[in-house]
Amino acid sequence: DSGVTQTPKHLITATGQRVTLRCSPRSGDLSVYWYQQSLDQGLQFLIQYYNGEERAKGNILERFSAQQFPDLHSELNLSSLELGDSALYFCASSVLASSYNEQFFGPGTRLTVL
Amino acid sequence: AQSVAQPEDQVNVAEGNPLTVKCTYSVSGNPYLFWYVQYPNRGLQFLLKYITGDNLVKGSYGFEAEFNKSQTSFHLKKPSALVSDSALYFCAVRDWAGGTSYGKLTFGQGTILTVHP
């Protein structure tokens, strides 16, 4: 158990809908990352927050947004969902935002868009 | 742009034999290299990392990795494989360019390791 929690574990929804994925980092970790894992794209970095502020951005679609709250938990919002958004979404956390800190991953949220 | 290649989609090895999972990387600055393992229906687990110093890095569960700057490689190794090592292995790199720290990990496509009894 990495200490990173994600809810829900599974999410099934329809095209055009909006969902929110939640992540609680390990105790003491200030940085949160979101990744998308799919069969065709592999593991892709989406976005990073550090102590409430956006720190780095990857291949995140404009339909997706995220935020980190004062208690350091983070939410990833996915809107106008398409079939291709079906994937496993991971949250990870690390103590700092530095490049040499390893990231600890949560169990993921499996999103299925029908 | 940084990139990671894992040239083998699958590696098969007999239990008790040594195993190697290959990884090569491309970065513009100093490479910070990581290995993660993913078991079915689980998140990624950190195995080991190379930041600086000794080229041979030891990690969890008896795994180690060798950093080779001239060959831009970071191969994962274990002297004696276990059936329980069967999983999906990811190599990842973080690029530190000058005074800027980038948060993102760039992952390879993954290598499925199967250890046969």
Image: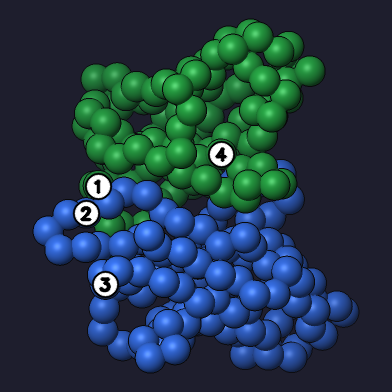
Chain colours: A green, B blue
Q: Which residue is mark 1?
A: A97
Coordinates of residue B45 in the picture (x, y in percent): 54, 56
Q: Is residue A46 above or below residue B33?
A: above
Q: Residue at x 49, y 19 (%)?
A: A63
Q: Residue at x 40, y 62 (%)?
A: B2
**Residue indicated by mark 4:** A36
Query: Alpha-carbon distance for marks 2 and 4?
Result: 21 Å
Q: Is residue A86 above or below residue A103?
A: above
Image location (x, y in percent) of residue B36: 53, 62
Amino acid type of the residue that numbered disc 2 sits on in the rendered structure? Ser
Q: Chain under label 3? A: B
Indicate the position of residue A56 as horizontal and vertical percent values: 30, 40
Residue B61: where, in percent of width, then height?
56, 73
Please rate how many residues cluster around mark 3, counting C-alpha atoms within 10 Å: few if below 14, some from 14 to 19, many from 20.
Answer: some
Q: Is residue A22 visible?
A: no
Give the CA distance from mark 2 to mark 3: 11 Å
Looking at the picture, which amino acid does disc 4 mark?
A: Gln
| Mark 1 vs mark 4, CA separation in Å | 19 Å
- Label 3 belongs to which residue? B30
Q: CA distance from mark 3 to mark 4?
A: 25 Å
The reply to whether dot 2 and dot 4 touch (C-beta < 8 Å) is no
